[in-house]
Image (cartoon, rainbow, N blue to C red):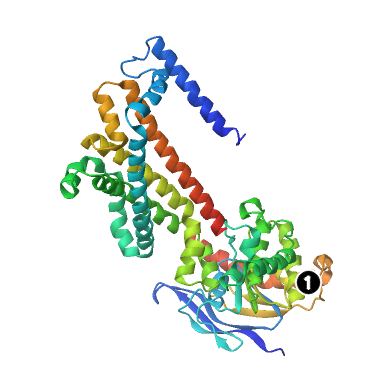
Amino acid sequence: MIRLAPVFGLVTLIAAGLALQGLIAIDVVSRYVVPPPSEVLAALGRIVVEEQVPARFLLTSAETFAAGLLILTAGVPAGFWLYHSRPFRRAFEPWVAAWAAAPLVLAYPLFLVLFGRSSITIVILGVAAGTAPVILKTVEGLAATRTVLIDVGRSLRLTRGQMFRKILFPAAMPAIFTGLRLGLTFSLINIVGVEFLINLGGLGQLINELAERYDLAGTYAAIGFVLLASMLFFVCLEHIERWLRRAYG
Amino acid sequence: MAVPTLTVEHVTKRFGTTEFGVTAVEDFTFDVAEGEFVSVIGPSGCGKSTLFHIIGGLTGDYQGRVTVGGETVNGPHPAIGMVFQEESTFPWRNVIDNVAFPLELRGVSRAERLERALHYVTMVGLRGFEQRYPAELSGGMRQRVSIARTLAAQPKILLMDEPFASLDEQTRLLLGAKVTQIQQRLRQTTLLITHSLTEAVQLSDRIVVMTFRPGRVRRIVEVRLPRPRGDDILTSPEFGRYVAELWVDLREEANRGLDAAEHLAT
């Protein structure tokens, strides 16, 4: 049954598409609001050729990848630091939670003034949007490590570094990866959003241009490529997590 | 009289302030000789786990002295291996890698540590389960993994805090027999903290009976049952006599505990 789950997911998606196609055909859903899925599928090939989708896809993916690396290198150590410094944790955790919930994309004019109209600004906004969930989930994962496991480490006289590498990090790994998934999602949303808003490079700009031209099928097809990028990052993260679990097992 | 490997001298531990605190353990003194199996038994809330943490070096700030081979224990000591009451296997490691963990810390090569770990896995009766993860094992099997992991560190003293507390009665008895076998085979100096009368009599050479709070030594009972102790010992009249004798002491202390709880409730 578990092996058939992906097939079940795909079948459900196809069924939903067919249902939508039917609803549009009988005018329950307006084709001027939602284009028929068949037209979106047909537009996929068209925009790949006419709108340089591969280059845009690579640019958005590269920006998200760069933001993801920065989120990882900043978020996990920051979470570890907050976990260890109880006073700072009490002082800053609510602010980090507020930061995670803030619609940072709306502050894009400020980022433009500070860093200029370039990919760097887009990456920085992606980092700003994606770091907070990683910090929060890292703290949560470390704090949820069972005391008895830490006591086992203490009884075996583990150094601080060994305690982190051998017990705290593996115990917190599922939560850290949940944070990374959330962080990357927030980051990708913000990156595409800023590309859209400042009309600069990547898939966000393409969505903006196609929407401006009222090419609805093309717009939805371009959104499909954003979903593809998101799925690729999820699959990569899943593989890294599995590899790390094996390495720590 | 054998030379004591572990000595606990006049240990007192108080939690909280002088005014509002509670004395968990008071003037506690006993020792464990090399190769001996000693149990500390007492009613719930008498300070058994506090004593376990003090001897294991996980709790500081107490009065008195704990020594291993004459050396004062200040923090976790390499000669003491601890088995905890709660389930303590690493869920991200399979059985063999859990057991090999202390050897990994010592930098033993992978091939050698797996071979040595397999020896302890076999000893606790988990051969064939090496590649399983803790989530795939029963509570009793997981506790056996913890015991094997502690034994793999080859500690001079095995210190166990109610390791079978969360298990059903049948598994407790079977595991008790397994621990006796291992202890006899390795001549392992063992200190078991427990609240189970049958477990204490089944396994021990001596039993230290604790009073209810503050935990003091009420008396030390020498168990003169023959070894090796098989399952038949559980049904022998001598076994029953020891259990009954200990119950007289323990009932009095347990009643004091109940009275104290009722007093708090009212």
Q: Residue at x 54, y 59 (%)?
A: A248
Which residue is farthest front? A49
In the displayed structure, A246 sits above or below B234; it is above
Looking at the image, can residue A188 be seen? Answer: yes
Looking at the image, residue B137 sits to the left or right of residue B71; the answer is right
Instruction: Identify the residue under disc 1.
Output: B241
Specify the farthest residue to the top: A26
Residue B150 position in % (x across, y down) = 63, 70
The quarter of the image holding the N terminus of chain B is bottom right
Q: Position of residue A236 (x, y in %)?
A: 46, 45
Which amino acid, mark 1? Arg
Chain under callout 1: B
Q: Is residue B104 above or below residue B205?
A: above
Q: Nearer the viewer, residue A132 or B207?
A: A132
- Front residue (pair A144, A173): A173
Q: Residues within 10 Å of mark 1 (few under 14, many from 20)?
A: few
**Image point (43%, 58%), residue name:** A143
Residue A10 relative to residue B153: left or right: left
Residue at 30% x, 21% y: name it.
Answer: A215
Place of residue A123 in the rendered image (x, y in percent of width and height, measured from the top left): 29, 47
Residue nearest the observer in this picture, A199 or B260? A199
State the count of labels.
1
Residue A161, position as x, y percentages in the image: 45, 69
Residue nearest the viewer, comparing B49 with B254: B49
Check disc 1 and report its element: helix, strand or loop.
Answer: helix
Q: Can you say whether A179 is above or below A198 in the image?
A: below
Q: Most extreme residue toward the left, as rendered? A: A113
Residue B193 visible in the picture: no
Q: Is residue A8 above or below residue B180?
A: above
- The quarter holding residue A126 reads top left
